[in-house]
Image (spheres, rainbow, N blue to C red):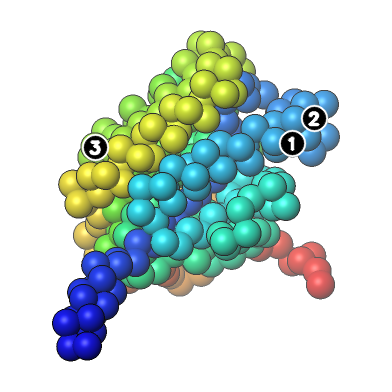
C-alpha cells in the first residue's frame, strides 16, 4: 500500500499545469488585405471570421497537444467580437469586447507560462506591411515606450512582460513577424503572407496557414524555457504622436501629460498596467459615452 501511495504521489508530481494566453488580431490572418475582410461592413468579413477562428483553433489544438492545460483567448480586433465562439473548444476561455484596461492583453496575469500572438500586423511607422498601424490607423502616427517605437505586438509583449510572461510565437505577414522579433527578441514566427503594400500581399492558402501555425506553436511550447519576457524599464515613458493637432492640445490640459510638440504628448506610467490604462483612455474616451 505504501508503495502504491508513493507511485500515485509521484504521478501527481509529474503533472504540471501550463497556461497559455492567445491574443488574436485579424489584419495578419491568411488572405486578409483590406477592410473588405476586416470590417463587419465588408463583403468578405463573415468568411474571414471563419479563417480567423480556424487559425485560433489550430493554435489551440497544437498547444493542448504540446502540454498546455489551460488556454485563454483574447478576441482583439476591431470591436473584439469577431471569433465564432461556438466553433472553439469547450475547454477554453474567451475574452470579448472593448474597452478594457489591458486592451489586447486583458486577462493575462503571472500564472501564464507563455503568450501567442495570432493575426498580427506591423506598426504605423513601418513602411512595410499589410494594414500597418498601431492601435488606431485613423488617429495615431507613433507610439513609443522609453523612446522605442512600438507595434501592437511589442506593446502587448511589454504588458505580458510586466507579469513575467514571455511571447513565444507570432503569426501574420512577413513585416509583422520581423518587426516584433527585432524589438523583443527571438520568437517562433509563422509567416502566412508576404506584403506587397498596405492593401496587397502574396498569401498562403488557409489550410497551409493552419498547418504552419500548428507547427510553430508546437515548436514554441517545446522550447518554452528559451523565451524571455520583454520588460521595459520602469517608470515607463509613453510618447504618443497623433495625426491631428487638437488631441495633443486638449490632453496637455491634464497635469500628468506633457505636450512635447504640436502633435505629441508624453505620459510617465509607474508600470505597464498604468501605461496601458492611459493609452486605452486616450483612444476611447469621449463625452458622449453611453450607457
Residue 234 screen position, x and y as percent: 25, 65
Counting residues from the start of the chain, the first of labels 1 and 3 encountered is: 1
* 7 and 90: which is toward the camera: 7
Q: Nearer the viewer, mark 1 or mark 3?
A: 3
Q: Which residue lies furthest to the front in this view?
A: 1
C-alpha separation, residue under disc 2 versus residue under disc 3: 35 Å
Query: Which residue shows up at 64% across the image and 50% down it?
Result: 88
Residue 75 visible in the displayed image = yes
Instruction: Look at 63% across and 41% down and name the residue there.
Output: 53
Distance of mark 1 from mark 2, alpha carbons?
A: 5 Å
Instruction: Tell me the SS state at disc 3.
Output: loop
Instruction: Tell me the number on the disc at residue 116.
Output: none
Q: Which disc, if any, is residue 42?
A: 2
The spot of residue 199 in percent (x, y) is 61, 18
Rendered location of residue 189, percent (x, y): 36, 31
The answer to whether residue 235 of the structure is visible from this angle is no
Quarter residue 273 falls in: bottom left
SS category of the residue bearing label 1: loop
Is residue 147 shown above or below 281?
above
Please tell me how crowded label 2 is: few (under 14), some (14-19), or many (20+) other residues with Cα within 10 Å: few
Please determine whether, in this image, residue 86 is positioned above or below residue 252. above
How many angstroms separate mark 1 from mark 3 (CA)?
A: 32 Å
Residue 276 image position (x, y, % from top left)? 46, 61
The residue at 61%/37% (across/down) is 54
Relative side of 209 to 216, left or right: right
Tell me the number on the disc at residue 186: 3
Name the residue that disc number 1 marks. Answer: 39
* Sequence-first disc among 2 and 3: 2
Amino acid at each position: 500500500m505504501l508503495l502504491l501511495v508513493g507511485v500515485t504521489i509521484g504521478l501527481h508530481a509529474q503533472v504540471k499545469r501550463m497556461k497559455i494566453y492567445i491574443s488574436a488580431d485579424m489584419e495578419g490572418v491568411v488572405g486578409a488585405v483590406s477592410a473588405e475582410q476586416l470590417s463587419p461592413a465588408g463583403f468578405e468579413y463573415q468568411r474571414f471570421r471563419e479563417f480567423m477562428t480556424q487559425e485560433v483553433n489550430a493554435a489551440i489544438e497544437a498547444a493542448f497537444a504540446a502540454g498546455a492545460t489551460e488556454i485563454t483567448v483574447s478576441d482583439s480586433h476591431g470591436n473584439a467580437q469577431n471569433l465564432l465562439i461556438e466553433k472553439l473548444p469547450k475547454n477554453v476561455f474567451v475574452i470579448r469586447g472593448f474597452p478594457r484596461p489591458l486592451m489586447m492583453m486583458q486577462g493575462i496575469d503571472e500564472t501564464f507560462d507563455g503568450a501567442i500572438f495570432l493575426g498580427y500586423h506591423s506598426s504605423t511607422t513601418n513602411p512595410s506591411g499589410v494594414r500597418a498601424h498601431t492601435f488606431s490607423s485613423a488617429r495615431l502616427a507613433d507610439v513609443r515606450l522609453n523612446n522605442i517605437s512600438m507595434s501592437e505586438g511589442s506593446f502587448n509583449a511589454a504588458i505580458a512582460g510586466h507579469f513575467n510572461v514571455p511571447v513565444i510565437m507570432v503569426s501574420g505577414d512577413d513585416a509583422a513577424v520581423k518587426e516584433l522579433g527585432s524589438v523583443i527578441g527571438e520568437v517562433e514566427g509563422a509567416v502566412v503572407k508576404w506584403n506587397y503594400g498596405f492593401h496587397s500581399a502574396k498569401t498562403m492558402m488557409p489550410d497551409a496557414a493552419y498547418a504552419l501555425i500548428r507547427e510553430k506553436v508546437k515548436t514554441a511550447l517545446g522550447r518554452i524555457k528559451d523565451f524571455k519576457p520583454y520588460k521595459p524599464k520602469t517608470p515607463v515613458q509613453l510618447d504618443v504622436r497623433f495625426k491631428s493637432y487638437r488631441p495633443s492640445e486638449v490632453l496637455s490640459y491634464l497635469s500628468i501629460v506633457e505636450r512635447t510638440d504640436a502633435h505629441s504628448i508624453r505620459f510617465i506610467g509607474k508600470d505597464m498596467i498604468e501605461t496601458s490604462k492611459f493609452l486605452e483612455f486616450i483612444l476611447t474616451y469621449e463625452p458622449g459615452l453611453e450607457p
